[in-house]
């Protein structure tokens, strides 16, 4: 990009310089032509003194006293007459040489002896339906020297402009690449563990990249922390269950059947703990972008399965969800979340469960699962989302479903609240930002 920018500036600069030089040369040609035109009356007077009016009567060898380098030509640009000044300078075939350049752009120059150049001006005259040309020459050495000096000055100025442009491009490249160099250094420090986050003092063009990288780092740290905590909790919980199992085996007061029963209970607890901690470790978003999952197909699939599972209760499982409404979660997490909430509702309800979803305030998706069961006591509404706490102590289970749902919702930046439903039972209300 740096080299391309410099080449474009140089190309435009040389093009403008060439155009300026060309316009200046044409302007000087027009000035010189105007000067010659102003002298035409003097030239005509000198021809008149020699009784050569019109001037087309002049022929080679005529002794005409005139102080200009001149020649007359016929329509075919054959030389008819040269002035004495032109003869003394040994300028021959003036008209014939002009014929070779007459179709070029002005100014017109005739070169003689490969070292002398003359500026040429042509005046055409129509005499008795016959075309003649009067060709006036002027030494172009001074004019060419002036044009050469002007050209050098123009290109010198262009060189200064290109030098300034080069310095500005170097400066722009340095200052524009400096944030990238800073980003590179910070990434190296992140890799070496010397930093935890990228700084926020980047230009607007890099804000999207640094924000996304910080988000990725945060998610990676959260997953790592969640995984580490889950493994620590699992190790601690299994250690307790194993110690209890050893104590049961060593208890000589228990019969064989009672020992087997208590050990199976501990094994069952350990199985639930392993499942819970594995789910807990895998919760949350994967990657930088939000996945979106359509809600209605999953609700209908779960409703069909749960009505068969609890067919003896004759549950009326209804829903009110738009067809195109989607949650900003992965499909697996939606299945886990709704599966736990709807299964709890069906297990505890009398015979009515309802799942509803709508967009709230244009920027929040509100999802609710309500039932007509006994509801949740106010004293334990905030406790039952903790691992191991159950509202229904009469049913088997370890109280991990609502804890999994709560951690899953939190990992996506949502909220889970428990209220009393219009059906008289519990209402689990979840809100996710769009």
Image (cartoon, rainbow, N blue to C red):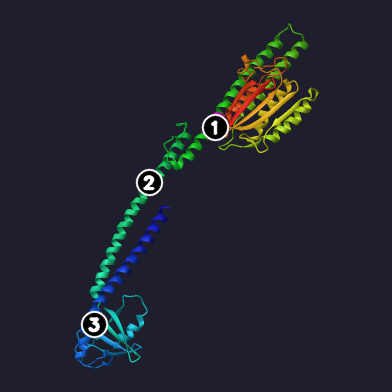
Image quadrant assignment for residue 302: top right
Q: Provide the residue designation for mark 1.
A: 219
Mark 2 to mark 1: distance in Å?
33 Å
Mark in the foreground, 3 or 2: 3
Q: Which of the 4 image quadrants contains residue 112? A: bottom left
Lower position in the chain sequence, tag 2 or tag 1: 2
> Which stretch appears magenta?
217-223
* Residue 88 in sight: no
Image quarter in which the C terminus is found: top right
**Residue at mark 2:** 174
Name the secondary structure under disc 3.
Answer: helix
- How many C-alpha atoms fall within 10 Å of the one at disc 2: few (<14), some, or many (≥20)? few
- Residue 251 painted magenta: no
In which quarter of the view is residue 263 placed? Answer: top right
Q: How far is mark 3 from mark 2, CA to CA?
A: 64 Å
Residue 34 in picture, x, y percent from top left: 26, 76
For the residue pair 325 and 96, the one nearer the viewer reads as 325
In the rendered image, residue 148, in percent from the top left (x then y), is placed at: 27, 69
Taking the spot 67% from the left edge, 13% from the top edge, the residue there is: 244
What type of secondary structure mainly makes up the magenta span?
Answer: helix
What crowding class fits label 1: few (fewer than 14 Cα within 10 Å), some (14-19), or many (20 or more)?
some
Instruction: Please state the horizontal and vertical placement of residue 226, each as a whole percent of the image.
Output: 57, 26
- Left or right of 246? Residue 315 is right
């Amino acid at each position: 990009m740096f080299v391309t920018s410099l080449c474009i500036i140089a190309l435009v600069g040389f093009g403008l310089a060439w155009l300026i030089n060309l316009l200046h040369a044409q302007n000087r040609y027009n000035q010189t032509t105007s000067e010659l035109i102003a002298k035409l009356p003097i030239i005509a007077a000198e021809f008149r003194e020699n009784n050569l009016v019109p001037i087309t009567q002049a022929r080679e060898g005529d002794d005409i006293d005139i102080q200009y380098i001149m020649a007359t030509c016929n329509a075919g640009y054959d030389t008819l007459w040269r002035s004495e000044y032109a003869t003394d300078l040994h300028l021959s075939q003036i008209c014939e040489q002009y014929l070779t350049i007459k179709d070029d752009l002005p100014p017109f120059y005739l070169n003689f002896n490969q070292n002398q150049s003359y500026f040429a001006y042509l005046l055409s005259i129509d005499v008795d339906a016959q075309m003649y040309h009067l060709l006036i020459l002027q030494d172009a050495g001074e004019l060419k020297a002036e044009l050469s000096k002007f050209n050098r000055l123009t290109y010198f100025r262009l060189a200064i402009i290109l030098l300034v442009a080069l310095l500005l491009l170097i400066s722009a490249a340095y200052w524009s690449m400096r944030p990238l160099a800073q980003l590179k250094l910070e990434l190296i420090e992140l890799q070496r563990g010397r930093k935890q986050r990228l700084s926020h003092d980047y230009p607007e063009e890099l804000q999207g990249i640094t924000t996304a990288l910080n988000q990725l780092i945060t998610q990676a740290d959260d997953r790592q922390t969640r995984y580490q905590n889950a493994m620590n909790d699992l190790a601690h919980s299994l250690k307790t269950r194993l110690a209890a199992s050893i104590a049961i085996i060593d208890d000589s007061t228990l019969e064989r059947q009672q020992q087997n029963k208590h050990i199976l209970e501990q094994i069952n607890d350990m199985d639930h703990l392993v499942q819970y901690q594995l789910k807990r470790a895998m919760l949350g978003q994967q990657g930088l972008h939000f996945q979106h999952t359509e809600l209605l197909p999953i609700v209908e699939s779960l409703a069909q399965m749960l009505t068969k599972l609890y067919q003896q209760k004759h549950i009326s499982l209804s829903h009110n969800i738009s067809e195109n409404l989607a949650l900003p979660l992965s499909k697996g997490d939606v299945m886990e979340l709704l599966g736990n909430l709807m299964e709890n509702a069906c297990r505890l309800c009398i015979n009515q469960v309802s799942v509803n979803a709508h967009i709230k305030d244009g920027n929040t998706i509100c999802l609710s699962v309500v039932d007509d069961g006994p509801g949740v006591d106010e004293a334990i509404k905030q406790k039952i989302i903790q691992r191991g706490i159950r509202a229904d102590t009469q049913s088997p289970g370890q109280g991990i479903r609502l804890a999994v749902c709560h951690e899953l919702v939190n990992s996506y930046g949502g909220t889970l609240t428990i209220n009393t439903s219009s059906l008289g039972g519990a209402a689990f209300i979840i809100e996710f930002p769009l």
